[in-house]
Amino acid sequence: MADISLNTAPQSVDSLQSSYMAQVQRRRLYGGLTLLIFVVLMVSGFNIADERNAGGFWEGLHNIGDYPADVLSEAWAKRADLPALIAKYFPALVETINIAAVSTLLGTIGGVLLSLLGTRGLAKWPRLIPLFRRISDIMRAVPEIVIALVLIFVLGGGPVPAMIAIAIHTAGALGKMFSEVAENTDIKPVEGLASTGATWSQRMLLGVLPQVAPNYVSYTLLRFEINIRASAILGFVGAGGIGYELRNAMAWGPGRFDEAGAIFILLFGTIVFFDQVSSRYRNRLTEGQGQ
């Protein structure tokens, strides 16, 4: 019996080792094939994009620094006018920040509702969970610029289409993140409130939101940073704000590059400022939650 056990033990170790090595080789093979497919898709996609490009990527690559150099040289030559230009375009910057703030607020409210209605164990109508999740998927899948273009066609240019477009996309994005946070909440407070006869809204307000509030606020602040950039970009399609002024300054060409430089300074300073403030408060919320 002892001889049999001694003989079978090395065989079992050898079989385990060979099985492990086979799995490692299989994973390496799959990884290599995935990398090869990725490279092929990247190369083919780049070639298609280069063919559709008006001038060709490689032919225009050496000119990539010409436009920034022209803007910087003209802005530096007219640097004495920059303070006045910054003051001139500051109201447009305030409009952009207002668009981002209102859209973030509306999107956060929509995201909270979508997350609570689409989370297992918390939803008011469990059978409708897939519906609310698909609504959230659709809202965040469509880019803000596409929604803004449709709304501009219907409502005309201005900040309202930009605000609605960013709010829709924000609600979908935050709904997904909020739902993942809500799935990890402790269900016992909710069950305790239910036993006392509390309504669904009372259970969510008193049992769930106090647990998830730090993460919800952190994600909202992060989204606010993103929406500032998004509202500036939407200005290029006629949605108002400082992006609209930047498009006009860039389209005019030489002679107004100093205005473009002033707008770039405003945008850069604003984004850095809100990034630092948001990061500070998000870190405080995370540390407070950890404690």
Image (cartoon, rainbow, N blue to C red):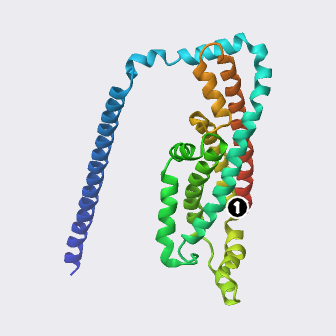
Q: Within the image, what quadrant is residue 15 found in?
A: bottom left
The quarter of the picture where the N terminus appears is bottom left
Up/down of 257 relative to 162, above or below: above
Q: Secondary structure at mark 1?
A: helix
Residue 46, x across and y down, in percent: 35, 32
Q: Nearer the viewer, residue 44 or 88?
A: 88
**Residue at 76% across, 32% down:** 90
Taking 54 as reference, is 132 left or right? right
175 versus 234 height, above or below: below
Q: Would you say 9 lies left or right of 161 here?
A: left
**Rendering coords of residue 197 (x, y %):** 69, 89
Residue at the image position 52 percent from the left and 56 percent from the top = 139
Could you say where residue 260 lies in the image, as x and y percent from the top left? 66, 22
Q: Quadrant of the C terminus?
A: bottom right
Q: Nearer the viewer, residue 220 or 40?
A: 220
**Which quadrant of the structure image shows residue 61?**
top left
Q: Does 271 appear above or below 106?
A: above
Decide if residue 54 is in sight here: yes
Q: Residues within 10 Å of mark 1 (few under 14, many from 20)?
A: some
Extreme residue toward the top, this view: 77
Residue situated in front as seen by the camera: 56 or 250? 250
Residue at 28% across, 50% down:
30
The picture places residue 231, in percent across and down from the top left corner, at: 63, 41
For residue 82, side relative to residue 260 (left or right): right
The amino acid on which the numbered mark 1 sits, given as a three-letter code, is: Pro
Residue, disc 1: 214
